[in-house]
Amino acid sequence: MTLKGNVHKFGDDINTDYIISGKYKFKTLDMNELATHLMEDIVPDFYKKVKEGDFIVAGKNFGCGSSREQAPLVIKYAGIPAVIAKSFARIFFRNGINVGLVLIEADTDGIDTGDEIEADIEKGEIRNITKGTFIKSSVLPGFMLKIIKSGGVVNYIKENKEFKL
């Protein structure tokens, strides 16, 4: 499974309230509406800049803070198929996989906003097309890849009629 897109880079400790501000979390359950507020506390017009297939790239501890599923969901609903970070907060990582968002751990120092990259999530390779470089990345375990390819854990269970690992 290979993903290709442009980079929007953020720093360390991007918490779930930066991903989707707390002032919106309880106003609506419409993920398409919530996605329009993605990262707006950091980049006010971020949703207008992001295109289907783009990546969020960050430093360490991405997704720290509250454990609400809205954070990975709004990323996915904004058309972003993957987040690449040095590390993820544990609960965010699990919620991301559960909703079918690809999460890749890698050294992101050589990736910048505006770079075009291609990530092969099964091989654990990121190719920075802009800079002509390669970065090794984590590879998700097989059962997590199955969940991702199904679009999340709920779809995986519907397709398989039970949870088979």
Image (cartoon, rainbow, N blue to C red):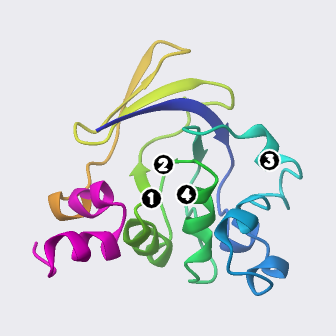
Pick the residue in front: 122 or 136: 122
Instruction: Tell me which residue sits at (81%, 77%) in the image.
Output: 24
Task: Please tell me which of labels 1 and 4 falls first in the chain.
Answer: 4
**Which amino acid type corresponds to the residue marked 4 in the rendered image?**
Lys
Task: Please tell me which of labels 2 and 3 falls first in the chain.
Answer: 3
Q: Of helix, strand and loop, which one carries label 4?
A: helix
Could you say which disc has been placed on residue 82 in the image? 2
Do the residues bearing badges 3 and 4 touch, measured as CB atoms within 8 Å? no
- Count of numbered badges drawn on the protein: 4
Do the residues bearing badges 1 and 4 touch, measured as CB atoms within 8 Å? yes
Within 10 Å of disc 2 (Cα), the crowding (few <14, some 14-19, many 20+) is many
Within 10 Å of disc 3 (Cα), the crowding (few <14, some 14-19, many 20+) is some
- Is 100 drawn above or below residue 164 in the view shown? above
Main secondary structure of the magenta stretch: helix
The residues tagged by marks 2 and 1 sit, at their Cα atoms, a distance apart of 6 Å
Do the residues bearing badges 3 and 1 touch, measured as CB atoms within 8 Å? no
**Residue 5 pos. (x, y %):** 54, 30
**Which amino acid type corresponds to the residue marked 2 in the rendered image?**
Ala
Give, as a single range, the part of the protein colored magenta: 145-165
**Residue 58 pos. (x, y %):** 60, 49
The residues tagged by marks 3 and 1 sit, at their Cα atoms, a distance apart of 19 Å
The residues tagged by marks 2 and 3 sit, at their Cα atoms, a distance apart of 16 Å
Within 10 Å of disc 1 (Cα), the crowding (few <14, some 14-19, many 20+) is many
Instruction: Tell me which residue sits at (56%, 67%) in the image.
Output: 73
Front label number (2 vs 4): 4
The residues tagged by marks 1 and 4 sit, at their Cα atoms, a distance apart of 6 Å
The residue wearing badge 3 is 46
Q: Of helix, strand and loop, which one carries label 2?
A: strand
The residue wearing badge 1 is 101
Within 10 Å of disc 4 (Cα), the crowding (few <14, some 14-19, many 20+) is many
